Image: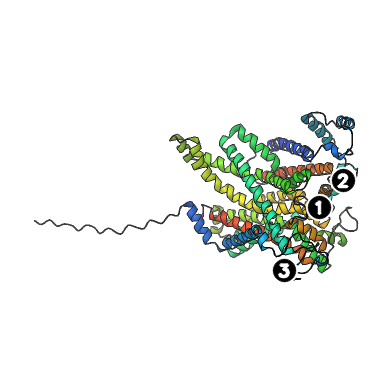
Amino acid sequence: MSVTTTPAPVLAPPLAAPRSRGYWGTVGYRLRHDPVTLFFGALLLMIILSALFAPWLSPFDPYKESIIRRLKVPGYMGHLLGTDELGRDMLSRLLHGGRITLMMGFVPVLVATLVGGGLGILAGLAGGRVNALIMRVMDVFYAFPSVLLAVAISGAMGGGVFNALLALSLVFIPPLCRVAETATTQVRNLDFVDAARATGAKLHLVLWHHVLGNVLGPILVYASGMISVGILLGSGLSFLGLGVKPPEPDWGLMLNTLRQAIYVNPLLAALPGIAIFLTSVSINMVSDGLRSAMDVRL
Amino acid sequence: MLLHLQRRLLAVLPIALGVSMICFLLVYLAPGDPLQTLLPPDADAETVAKLKQLYGLDRPLPLQYLAWLWQVMGGDLGQSIATGRPVLSEIRRSLGNTVLLAAVAVLIAFPLAMLLGTIAGYRSGGWMDRGVTGTAILGVSLPNYWLGIVLVILFSVELGWLPASGMGPDGSGTFNPLHWEQLRHIILPVVTLSMIPVGIIARTARASISEVMAQDFVTTLRANGLPERRVLRHAVKNALPSVLAVMGLQFGALMGGSILVETVFAWPGTGFLLSKAILTRDIPVLQGTILVLAMIFVATNLAVDLFQSSLDPRIKRG
C-alpha cells in the first residue's frame, strides 16, 4: 500500500495587509494630496518668512521719512509699492508691519490655547463644582461679542501692543476653554478611559496617553481657526488707534493713516488691507484643510 | 413652555450680573486712579481724599459695585467727560442708528446666505459646494473695515455715486426708507457690514441642509415619488430653525461688532460713539456703551434661544 501523500496545499501568498499609516500618517498623507491647502500653506509660509526676514528684505528704512516723496505711486524712484503719507517706503513698511500683525494672530492664540485649553481640560476632568465654577465664569466672558470685549479691555487699559495682546488673549480663552471642556468630557466618559483606570494605570498616564491624545486634535484645529480672527481683530484694534503706536509699522495702523489719502492715491490705502486679507485667508484655508485632514469620519 | 422660560431667565440672570461686574471693573483697568481724570494733576492730598469720599471710592470694592449697580438700574450711567452730557442720553441718541444698520445688514445677508447655503448643502461635495464654501471663507477672512475703505474708493472717490460717510441730511433723525438721500448713505455701510454674516449664515445653512439631506426621511420622500423641489422644501423647513438662530446671534454680534465699520463710515451709532470715547479716553462713555451693548447681546441670545425652542419641538423644554 502506498501511502498517497496528498500534496501540501499550496498556500496563497499572504495577503498584503493594508499598510496602516496610523492617524498622523493619514493626516499627513491627506494634506500632501490637498493642493488647495498646500498652496495656501506655501503662501502663509512666505508671508511669515518675509515678516521674519523683513530687515534683510526691505529695500529702504521703514522709518525714513521724506517730505518731497509723499504718497507716490508704485515704482516711483525705486519704491516698488510707492510711499506713504510721510514719504516712507510702502514695501519696507508692509514687510515690517507683518511682524506685529502676525504676532497679534499667533501670540494670543498660543496663550489662550495654553490657559483656556488647560482650564477646559481641568474642568472636563474634574467635573462637578470645579467644572461649574470655571465654565460659568467663561459664560460671562462669552456674553460679549468678541470685537466688543477686545475693544472694551484695550480701550480701558489704553493703547499699546502689550495691552492689545492681553485683550485678545482674554477674548480667545473662553471659546478655547469650551472646546477643550467639551472634548475632555466626551473622552472622559468613554469606556477605554475607564478600562485604563481599571487596569491600574496611574492617573497621569491615563491623562497623558488617552485624554490629551484625543483632546489635543480638536483644540488645535479650533485654535488654528482663531489665528485669523486674531489678525483681523488685532489690526482692527490698531485701526481704532488701540494697539500699535505710530511710527511703528502695522497693517491696521497703516490702513487707518492711509485712509485719509484715498483722494490722493487710493491704491496705497488698499495695500495693507490686501496684506491682512491674504494672511487671514491663507490661515483659514490651512485651518480648514487641517480640519478635514484630521476628520476621522472621512 | 412657561417653565422653560422661567428656567432660561434664571440662567441668564447670573450672566447679566457677571457682565455688569466686568463693565464695572473696566474703570479699574484704566491706568491710574479713576479720580485722575477729574482732578488737576497738582491737587493736594486733602482734596483727593475729599473727592474719594464724595464718590465713594474709599469704600471696599464690592460695596462700590453694589452702589454703582443701583445707580445703573436707575438709569444713571454717569456723565461723559468729553461733553458733560449724561452717558445714557448719548447712548440713546446713537443706539437707534446702530440697530438700524445691524438689522438691515442681517436682513440682507439672510436670503443671500440661505440661497448660497442651500445650493451648497443640497449638492454637498460638488463644485457648487466648493465655490460657496470658498466664498464663505473669503467673507469671514475679509477685514470688513478694509472692504469699507475699498468700497468708498470705488463708489465715492472714483465713481462719485454714493456718499463716503455720515447719515445724510437729517443726520440721526428718523430714518425713512423712501428718502433716497438717506438710503444712499446707508448702502455702503450695510454692504460692508453684511459681509461677515453672509459667510457665517451660509456656512450654517450649508451644514444643516446637507445634514438634513442625509437623513432617512429624505430617502422616504424620494421613494414616495415626491418631486425634488418639494423634497428640498422639506429640507429647508428642517434646517431653518438653526439658521434663524445663527441669524439672531449675528444680529447681536453686529450690534457690538459694528464699531470698525461705523468708524470707517462715520456712521453716528454706538460704535462710532465708542471709537470717539477711546480717542478722548472718555471712560464713563466707554463703560456705559459697552454695558448696554453687552446686555443687548445677552438679551438677543436669550430671545434666540426661546424662539428656537418654541419653533423646534425637538428641543427639550424641560
> What element does badge 1 sit on?
helix
Chain letter behind tag 3: A
Q: Nearer the viewer, residue A40 or B227?
A: A40
For mark 3, give the secondary structure. Answer: loop
Helix, strand or loop at label 2? It is: helix
Instruction: Determine crowd level at label 1: few under 14, some 14-19, many 20+ residues with C-alpha closer than 10 A.
Output: some
Percent x, y for residue A192? 47, 40
Q: Are marks 2 and 3 in contact (CB under 8 Å)?
A: no
Q: Residue furthest left?
A: A1
- Mark 1 and mark 2: span between their CA atoms? 17 Å
Q: Which residue is mark 1?
A: B100
Mark closer to the observer (2, 3): 3
Which numbered tag is attached to residue B90?
A: 2
Q: Residue at x 58, y 53 (%)?
A: B211
- Whether B120 is drawn above or below B25: the answer is below
Closer to viewer: mark 1 or mark 2: 2
Q: Nearer the viewer, mark 3 or mark 1?
A: 3
Residue position for label 3 = A80
Q: Could you tell me how far apart the alpha carbons at marks 3 and 1 are, in whole angstroms? A: 43 Å
* Residue A237 seen in the current view: yes
Q: Quadrant of the N terminus of chain A?
A: bottom left
Labels 1 and 2: the sequence-earlier one: 2
From the viewer's perspective, tell me whether residue B152 is left or right of residue A278: right
Q: Are marks 1 and 2 in contact (CB under 8 Å)?
A: no
Classify mark 3: residues with Cα within 10 Å, few (<14), some (14-19) or many (20+). Answer: some
Chain to which mark 2 belongs: B
Q: Is residue A22 left or right of residue B1?
A: left
Q: Quadrant of residue B187?
A: bottom right
